[in-house]
Image (cartoon, rainbow, N blue to C red):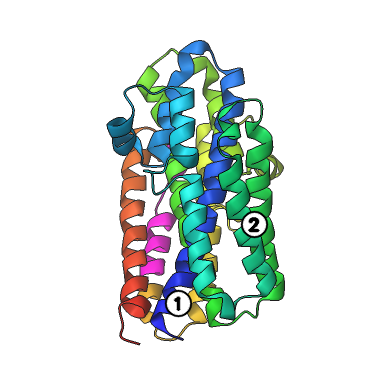
Amino acid sequence: MLSRVAERLYWLGRYVERAENTARLIAVNNNLMLDMPNSADVIWQSLLEILAAGADFGARYNTVSERNVIRWVLAEDSNGSSLVSSLRAARENARTVREVMPSESWELINDLFWSAQEGAESALARKSRPGYLDQIVLKSQQFAGMLHNTMSHREPYHFIMLGATLERMDMTSRILDTGAASVLKRVGTALAAYENILWMNVLMSLSAYQMYRQQVRERVNGPDVVRFLLHDNAFPHAIAFCVDALEHALGQLPRSRLPLQGNRRVLQKLSRANPDQLLGEGLHAFIDELQIELAGLHQEIVNTWFATTD
């Protein structure tokens, strides 16, 4: 396969996954504001931190408000990682590799981008936002399901899965880092009574609440949420599950020795993590180290397959 085709497939997977995750985060934080006190505007700051958008947002807006944050993460033209920008990039990558994908999948991603762009302005209003976000998530999942069921599971498919899975690992780790523990630390005791709600928010951001409750019978709490999202090898958004999925996808591709080694370094770091000891600064430091390993794995993928001459 040509390296430029493989690279576009990889980024197609990443951008669709990014758009879906962004839609989930906005939707869950939108609902969370109904349960939290008025002093919980810090939740919108947390959303910017999860998306690593704080500095760029600050250069564009003077205040962190619901409307400013929603506009920035949803459809701000100058934000290359906004939901609409991610779908625009996904559409462009899909357009250039249409010949290796089922035609229906191209039609779906094309429709997803245009509907997202056309509806973005109305979604700034809280009333119409849930329906808009639900459609983004639904069509993104439909796209993934269509590929799984109608695309041959050969090299092109595995490059899409590499991108989607690595993006998912990145987002799960970010949500764990800034979704609850850092919020509680920032506001001190002001939101301590809402700790349970914040950890539930972490789970819901990843559509993990129901599966978590099936596995953990105790009240939702930080250590068990961290343990589930790091170590559960049966839940698709858990880091351990993603490591296994990457191992499989990488094993189907040629010249995968170095990326496989990078993935196994992630597994080694994961195996040494003790959720009971990670909360607070320990969790933040661990996620920083995990992010470095994920960045290294991404670079191994780039060096192995995309930085070559066709």
Count neighbours of disc 1 (C-alpha within 10 A) and say few if under 14, some if 14 to 19, many if 20 or more: many
> Callout 2: few (<14), some (14-19), or many (20+) C-alpha neighbours within 10 Å?
some
Residue at 31%, 42% (x, y): give it: 285
Left or right relative to 51: residue 232: right
Residue wearing tag 2: 111
Per the image, is 248 magenta? no
| Mark 2 residue element | helix
Q: Secondary structure at mark 1?
A: helix
Residue in the foreground of this view, choosing between 191 and 217: 191
Residue 162 shows in this picture: no
Asked if residue 219 is positioned above or below residue 50 in the image, the reply reads: above
Quadrant assignment for the C terminus: bottom left
Q: Is residue 118 above or below residue 36?
A: below
Distance between the Cα atoms at labels 1 and 2? 23 Å
Q: Nearer the viewer, residue 192 or 69?
A: 69
Which residue is the site of mark 1? 6
Residue at the image point whose x is 58% and y is 25% from the top: 32
Q: Position of residue 90 (x, y in %)?
A: 51, 60
Q: Position of residue 186 (x, y in %)?
A: 36, 22
Left or right of 131, for residue 241:
left
Q: Quadrant of residue 194?
A: top right
